[in-house]
Image (tube, rainbow, N blue to C red):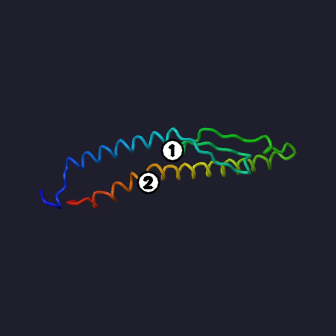
Amino acid sequence: MNPGDVNLQQLLEQAQLMQQQLVTAQQELSDAEVEGTAGGGLVVATVNGSGELLELKISPKAVDASDPEETVETIADLVLAAVRDAVRSAAELQQEKLGPLAQGLGGGLGQLPGF
């Protein structure tokens, strides 16, 4: 074997190991829960690590019975902000869990010797 040749068996083993790590990381993301908040905690959105909305809590303090129209608009804005905050946290978690695996690919086949 020449020094620049690719050991296909070793490459296959590395790919299988990375596949197992990817499956594990995806399961961890699916099981993880992160929260986003808005309005100082008046609205709390919980998403899983994949960004799927799991729960939404709205504090009764967010409701102003004397001005229902304004309350509806305010709550809608707070819900959007809380969900965006939670999804941002989920994206950070995804980067934390999946980032090292992407780096392990070395940027794709173009980085592998012999390709």
Q: CA distance from mark 2 to mark 1?
A: 14 Å
The residue under label 1 is which amino acid type? Ser
| Quarter-of-image position of residue 43 | top right
Image mark count: 2
Q: In this rendering, would 24 be left or right of 16?
A: right
Find numbered disc 1 in the image and state the secondary structure of the residue it sits on: loop
Question: Residue, x 51% and y 38% (percent of image)?
Answer: 31
Question: Residue, x 19% and y 50% (percent of image)?
Answer: 8
Find numbered disc 2 in the image and state the secondary structure of the residue it sits on: helix
**Camera-side residue of 25 and 48:** 25
**Image coordinates for residue 23, horizontal then vertical, percent:** 39, 41
Looking at the rendered image, the quarter that the C terminus falls into is bottom left
Mark found first going from the N terminus, 2 or 1: 1
**Image coordinates for residue 113, horizontal then vertical, percent:** 23, 60
Looking at the rendered image, the quarter that the N terminus falls into is bottom left
Question: Residue, x 31% and y 57% (percent of image)?
Answer: 108
The residue under label 2 is which amino acid type? Gly
Q: In this figure, which residue is indicated by the disc labeled 1?
A: 50
**Image coordinates for residue 24, horizontal then vertical, percent:** 42, 40
Q: In this rendering, would 64 be left or right of 75?
A: right
Question: Residue, x 38% and y 56% (percent of image)?
Answer: 103
**Camera-side residue of 22 and 43:** 22
The circle on residue 23 is none
